[in-house]
Each structure stands twice: as C-alpha cells, then as structure tokens.
Image (cartoon, rainbow, N blue to C red):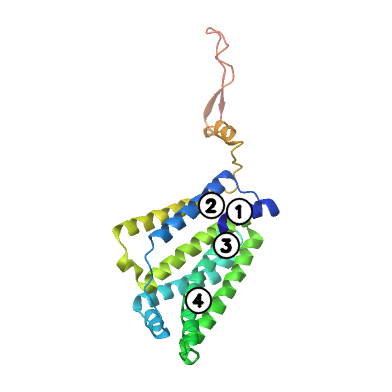
Amino acid sequence: FSVLCSALLSSYLLGERLNLLGKLGCLLSLVGSTVMVIHAPEDEEVTTLEEMTSKLKEPGFLAYAAILLALCFLLIFCLAPRYGHSNILIYLAICSVIGAFSVSSVKGLGIAIKGFFAGQPVLQNPLTWILVITLVASITTQINYLNKSLDIFNTSLVFPIYYVLFTTIVITTSIILFKEWVTMTVVDIIGTVCGFLTIILGVFLLHAFKDMDVSFGNLPQVLQNEQPAPVTRDDKNILIEVDNSSIAPEDKPKVFMLCT
C-alpha cells in the first residue's frame, strides 16, 4: 500500500512520471513481498533480554552482522561518493542494510519495555542501552541517505525499490536471528524463493525501463514503431553502386565507385 500511495502521490503532486512498466514493477514488488511474508515462518518466542542476548551472540548472526557492517562501510565510504548521484541503488542499499540493525533493535527494545512494566531490572542491563544507541544511529543514517536519494531521483522509483530491498533484508535478518528456516516446509521454501524472484523482476522493471515513454495509450504505437537495427558497413574498400539497377535497362552499363 505504501508503494502504490507513494507512486500515485508523486505522480499527481510532484509531477513525476511513472510509465506502464514502472506500475507493473510496483505491482510485482508488492506481490513478491506479500508471498514472502505469507510463507515466512513464525519467529521463535523471545520474552527476556537474556534470551535476546543469547540470540545476538550466536556465531551465525555475528557473522551475518559482520558482513552487513562491512557492506555498509563499503557502500558509504567507497561507492556512495563515486556512484551515489548516478545509481539509485547505492543510497537505498545503505538504508536497507542499516534497516536490519534498526529492526533488530526495535525487537529487543520491545522486549525491554515489556520487562520494564513487568518489574524487571532492564535499565541495569547493558543490552538495553546498546539497543538504544544502535537504533538511534541506524535510523539517523537511514533518514540521511533516504533524503539524499529523494533529492536526486524520482520519488515514484525510490520508495518501491527501497521497500523491496528493506523487506528482503529484514526477513533475511529475522530468519537468521531466530532460526526460522529450521521450521520451514518445502512449500514455504518454494514460496519464499518465488516471492524473491518476483521482487527481483519488479525492481528490474522499475529501474531498467524508467526512461521509456510507455503507457496504455501509446503501447500499440510503441510496438509498431520498432525498427530493425541498422547494418554497420565498412567505410573502406566498398563498392558503392551509383546507378539504380532497379530502373536501369539491362543493357545499360552500370557505374561503380571505389572508395579508399
């Protein structure tokens, strides 16, 4: 719903154009994300900060978090200064990768808030303050790079691509952190993979054909105006027939020019 609203509002209020393929990409992105969420298993119940701490200390999640941090630093310090103003995926990838930490922090802080009202000493737990600092830093970074992306690129393209990348990263983080893949059935695995492939197709339609003027009104004309690619010929040592052989008599000598 947010993707469709942002696309429609940016079209009517900001004057930004979203062609037919872009609208189809939005629809496919929503369908793919919905399929992934439907087939995603329920997360393991975590009720205390101690259980959350044990989850965060597991080697699998630590390795995953290290990879995300390395990717984030690579995007921020190496790729963003060079390609951030020309490639829409750079800033949005930073926001999505950081989103994995913000969602995990929100999950932990939700547990801390429940424990606080239950009378548990959550304020004395170092994890509470670590989660607060992580949440503030991650949200600030997300807002910063999302605003940069909105200043440069089309709003109707930014929100769908960001939604798709963010949803994918968050679901992957939840699966690794709470080991949801252990309880997944074959149907859920197939559904998740199909949903992910649908998301990739939607993002491709949004990004690859954003400059094409395609709509329901001019679609037949666009299809009819497709011309074959011109044939490239050598510019040296070519025999060029000057006289038109289709209208010339057969007994008339033909004139050729040799270009060197």
Q: Which residue is mark 4?
A: 106
Residue 73's place in the image compared with 130, above or below, is: above
Asked whether residue 191 appears in the rendered view, the answer is yes
Depth check, mark 2 against mark 3: the one in front is 2
Marks 3 & 4, CB-CB < 8 Å contact = no
User: Can see residue 87?
Assistant: no
Q: Is residue 232 above or below residue 74?
A: above
Q: Which residue is mark 3?
A: 83
Residue 89: quadrant of the picture: bottom right
- Mark 1 vs 2: CB contact within 8 A: yes
| Place of residue 5 in the rendered image (x, y in percent of width and height, measured from the top left) | 60, 56
- The residue beneath circle 1 is 7
- Tell me which numbered mark, 4 or 1, is placed earlier along the sequence: 1
Judging by the rendered image, the residue that carries numbered circle 2 is 26
Mark 3 closeness class: few <14, some 14–19, many ≥20 residues within 10 Å? some
Q: Disc 4 or 2, which lies upstream in sequence? A: 2
Q: Secondary structure at mark 2?
A: helix
The residue located at (53%, 78%) in the rendering is: 135
Q: Amino acid at mark 3?
A: Tyr
- Look at the image and tell me in which quarter the N terminus lies: bottom right
Q: Position of residue 132 (x, y in %)?
A: 53, 82
Image marks 4 and 2: residues in contact by CB distance under 8 Å = no
Name above or below for residue 207 compared with residue 240: below
Q: Nearer the viewer, residue 45 or 249?
A: 45
- What SS does tag 3 mark? helix
Q: Quadrant of residue 174?
A: bottom left
Q: Earlier in the sequence, mark 3 or mark 1?
A: 1
Q: Which residue is found at the position 66% from the left and 51% from the top?
A: 11
Q: State the separation of the CA atoms marked 2 and 3.
A: 24 Å
Quarter of the image for the C terminus: give it: top right
Distance in Å between CA atoms under marks 3 and 4: 31 Å
